[in-house]
Image: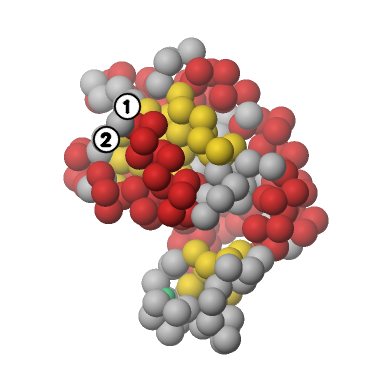
Amino acid sequence: MRMVLLGAPGSGKGTQADLLKDKYLCAHISTGDIFRRNLKDKTELGVKAGEFMNRGELVPDEIVIGMVKDRLREPDASSGFLMDGFPRTIPQAEAFDAMLDELGTPLDAIILLDIDEEILVKRLTNRRTCRACGKIWNLLSMKTENKTVCSDCGGELYQRDDDAELVIRNRLKVYHDQTSPLVSWYAKTGKLYTIEASASPDETLKKIQAALG
Ligand code: ADP
Ligand code: ZN
């Protein structure tokens, strides 16, 4: 299965990708995760990307495109992938089409996670990530007393730097201006499925599976 998850920040791309990769046994490729890992390891790529990420801006296309090209050549991607956070601009989508043409591996589906903007802001300000296992939590839906540790593994939960409210507003604006044009771009393929994504992760997963058939 080769799939793209499309949707605003906070729409649940990362959460759904985590659930879907176990069902369809394919690689989860999150460009945001790759940048964050590089930023933490202080690689050249990470330092460069970090400047843009902390302002809620997009990392320049040529950097992202080169990185995805390399990632797609890794062995685990040959059995399929879930793209989470890429493409995010029309030039990225054009470059991605060219990469897939060259590999002879067209996309099976593009999933658009559709959600109300006020819910997004609420989700993003309450989002926490486990430092140990990477699981994404939401403070509002956590059922435990202690909301500073991961209920799965006991790891410390942290808030992403770009989940501060002002940066969130900028990321939403960037989504509207630069990423949402991809909706009509992918609609033309006939493989775009729009999924209403304001309910729980499990309910959204069910809707995606129903759409994929
Ligand atoms: P979200 O979808 O919640 O905004 P991501 O983890 O996908 O979060 O991305 C975090 C940041 O990483 C983005 O705001 C951007 O700066 C950078 N980034 C990730 N993917 C891309 C991409 N395809 N093109 C440009 N920048 C990207
Ligand atoms: Zn954990």
* Residue 121 appears in the rendering: yes
Seen at 56% across and 24% down, the residue is 183
* Residue 67 appears in the rendering: no
Mark 1 or 2, nearer chain start: 2
Give the position of the C terminus as an image quadrant.
top left
Ligand 2 image-quadrant field: bottom left
Disc 1 is placed on an element classified as loop
Question: Relative to residue 40, is residue 115 drawn left or right?
Answer: right
Decide: is 21 above or below 105: below
Decide: is 101 above or below 58: above
Disc 2 is placed on an element classified as loop
Q: Are dots 1 and 2 in contact, CB under 8 Å?
A: yes
Mark 2 crowdedness (10 Å alpha carbons): few <14, some 14-19, many ≥20:
some
Hey, which residue is sitting farthest right in the picture? 166
Seen at 71% across and 30% down, the residue is 177
Tell me the residue that label 1 is attached to: 108
Identify the amino acid type marked 1. Answer: Asp
Mark 1 crowdedness (10 Å alpha carbons): few <14, some 14-19, many ≥20:
some
Q: Quadrant of residue 210?
A: top left
Residue 1, numbered label: 2
Q: Quadrant of residue 191?
A: top left
Residue 6 lies, in percent from the top left, at 51, 36
Give the position of the N terminus as an image quadrant.
top left
Seen at 70% across and 33% down, the residue is 176
Relative depth, front residue between 123 and 88: 123
Rounded to the nearest angstrom, the CA distance separating label 1 from label 2 is 6 Å
